[in-house]
Amino acid sequence: MEGPLFSRDKLVTLDAIRDARANLPRVIRRTPIVPVARDSAEMGNETLFLKCENQQVTGAFKIRAVFNVLHHLSAEQKAKGVVLASSGNFAQGFAFAGKTLGIPITVVMLDATSPYKVKGTEGYGAEVYLCGDDALARQPTVERLAEERGMTAIDTWEEPPIVAGHGTIGFEIMEQCPDAQQVLVPVSSGGVAGGIAAAVKLINPHVKVIGIQPERANAAYVSRQAGEPTAIDYWDSIADGLSARRPGEYPFMHLQAFLDDIVLVSEADIARAFRTILTRAKMLGEAAGVTAAAGFLSGKVDTSLKTVAALTGGNLTQETMAKLLAMAEASD
């Protein structure tokens, strides 16, 4: 998907991010930024703030990019529908947007996808197509279904409007918190990290932007070390929304251009961040959603800087919530 504002061999521009923001429908929320105190003594003097995309429509950040992608489809493509792969939040975003705009949506998911997210996607009227347990097999399945059904295949890792749509979060962060010194973003395939980082750096290149990944879901970290997108042969994290075993080619360009660093956090770090955000900020975040904040709360980044962490989603089951709280308690 290319056009006057987009090209797969060029970095997204601030104009493309502004255009994405201008085209967002009224249903998209300008989510709040709230402070998080690590302890009682820090109340009123917080240096960590959350960009609360868990309060976004469908409970996660991806709906912004979804509407931007669908905006750039032709009338014929909209009529025939789209097919994509997702571990859950993109699925619900496309399903909601498809229902809103009258566009048929098919979502390819792994068999192990959270039943909560499968049910949520189907609840918005999308078809869920399960493809086994290999994350790298999802996009080939998308391409096959698109060919068989005459639908438009959406590669959520590689479409430039995806990165621009995610960039609207970074744009808002800089509007709402212009004195931010550091922004933390979770990294999976790289789209949201690359989009937010691009917006922040293009507005103020002096702000540090750090990507945060789980230790055993660290494809972007490994790729950064290698200097090119590199697949990992393992994956084991409670943060199921960060399931990419290899970053996308287009997002990786942005990670290399705009991220200052990628830092790894443990499963215990993620669980403790979940508990802190739940009990102190009164915010519910899924494991992937709190991973960025875990970088700060675990002390893996500079905590003296005024920091905004993207709280990217809040879609999780009661069972996962209980597991995270048990993990946090066991790690004390």
Image (cartoon, helix red, strand yellow):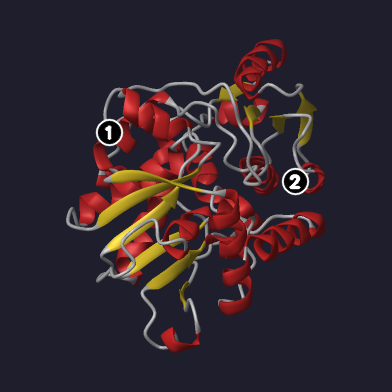
184 vs 312, left or right, is: left
Query: Which residue corresponds to mark 2?
Result: 117
- Identify whether 134 is placed above or below 114: above
Front-most of residues 90 and 147:
90
Q: Earlier in the sequence, mark 2 or mark 1?
A: 1
Query: Around disc 1, counting alpha carbons within 10 Å, would you say few (fewer than 14), some (14 to 19), or many (20 or more)?
Result: some
Residue at image location 34% in from the left, 50% down from the top:
210
Image coords of residue 29 (percent x, y): 53, 64
For the question of whether residue 283 can be seen, the reply is yes
Front-most of residues 321 and 289:
321
Residue type highlighted by circle 2: Lys
Residue at image location 51% in from the left, 41% down from the top:
215
Query: Which residue corresponds to mark 1?
Result: 11
Front-most of residues 178 and 225:
225
Query: Around disc 2, counting alpha carbons within 10 Å, would you say few (fewer than 14), some (14 to 19), or many (20 or more)?
Result: many
Residue at image location 76% in from the left, 43% down from the top:
114
- Identify whether 204 is placed above or below 11: below
SS of the residue under disc 2: helix
Residue type highlighted by circle 1: Leu
Where is the C terminus found, in terms of image quarters? bottom right
Image coords of residue 313 (percent x, y): 59, 56
Image coords of residue 241 (percent x, y): 61, 43
Nearer the observer: mark 2 or 1; the answer is 2
52 vs 115, left or right, is: left
For the question of whether residue 5 can be seen, the reply is no
